[in-house]
Image (cartoon, rainbow, N blue to C red):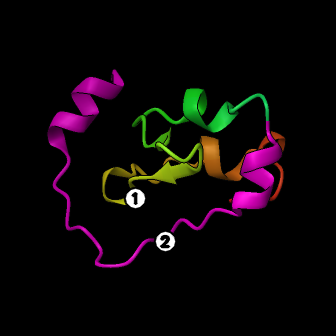
């Protein structure tokens, strides 16, 4: 099943608080920005202040961006 087909079946109940916290010091020093490209829900983005942000409400809880070792300990 493709991710787009799977998403069409999901029903979301958004949390009021994020379950994803970022260490901005680590994010600021990261040049690769793997999280932007690895997250299938496209939740990570830089804001106007060049700080990494994450829109937790759309999280698929699939794990690749958050649990992969190559992201260091920023998440």
Residue lying furthest bottom in this view? 16
Side of 26 relative to 5 (left or right): right
Residue 61 vs 65, above or below: the answer is: below
User: Percent position (x, y) of residue 59?
Assistant: 39, 52
Q: Quadrant of the C terminus?
A: bottom right
User: Percent position (x, y) of residue 54?
Assistant: 47, 52
Residue 40 is covered by the magenta coloring: no
Marks 2,1: beta carbons within 8 A = yes
Residue 6 vs 74, above or below: the answer is: above
Camera-side residue: 69 or 29? 29
Side of 12 relative to 46 (left or right): left
**C-alpha separation, residue under disc 2 versus residue under disc 1:** 7 Å
User: Residue at 23% of width from left, 26% of height from top?
Assistant: 5
Camera-side residue: 27 or 59? 27
Residue 27 is covered by the magenta coloring: yes
Residue beneath label 1, please? 56
Residue 60 vs 37, above or below: the answer is: below
Magenta segment boundaries in residue numbering: 1-30
User: Residue at 46% of width from left, 54% of height from top?
Assistant: 61
Camera-side residue: 1 or 73? 73
What SS does tag 1 mark? helix
User: Residue at 59% of width from left, 68% of height from top?
Assistant: 21
Q: Can residue 74 be seen by looking at this rendering?
A: no
Q: Earlier in the sequence, mark 2 or mark 1?
A: 2
Say the numbered circle drawn on residue 19: 2
Side of 25 relative to 45 (left or right): right
Side of 75 relative to 21 (left or right): right
User: Percent position (x, y) of residue 58?
Assistant: 32, 50
Label 1 crowd (10 A; few <14 / some 14-19 / many >=20):
some
What SS does tag 2 mark? loop
Q: How many marks?
A: 2
């Amino acid at each position: 099943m493709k991710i787009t087909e799977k998403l069409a079946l999901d029903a979301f109940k958004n949390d009021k608080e994020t379950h994803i916290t970022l260490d901005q010091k680590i994010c600021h020093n990261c040049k690769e920005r793997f999280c932007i490209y690895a997250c299938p829900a496209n939740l990570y983005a830089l804001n106007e202040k060049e700080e990494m942000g994450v829109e937790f409400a759309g999280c698929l809880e699939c794990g690749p961006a958050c649990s992969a070792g190559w992201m260091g300990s920023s998440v």
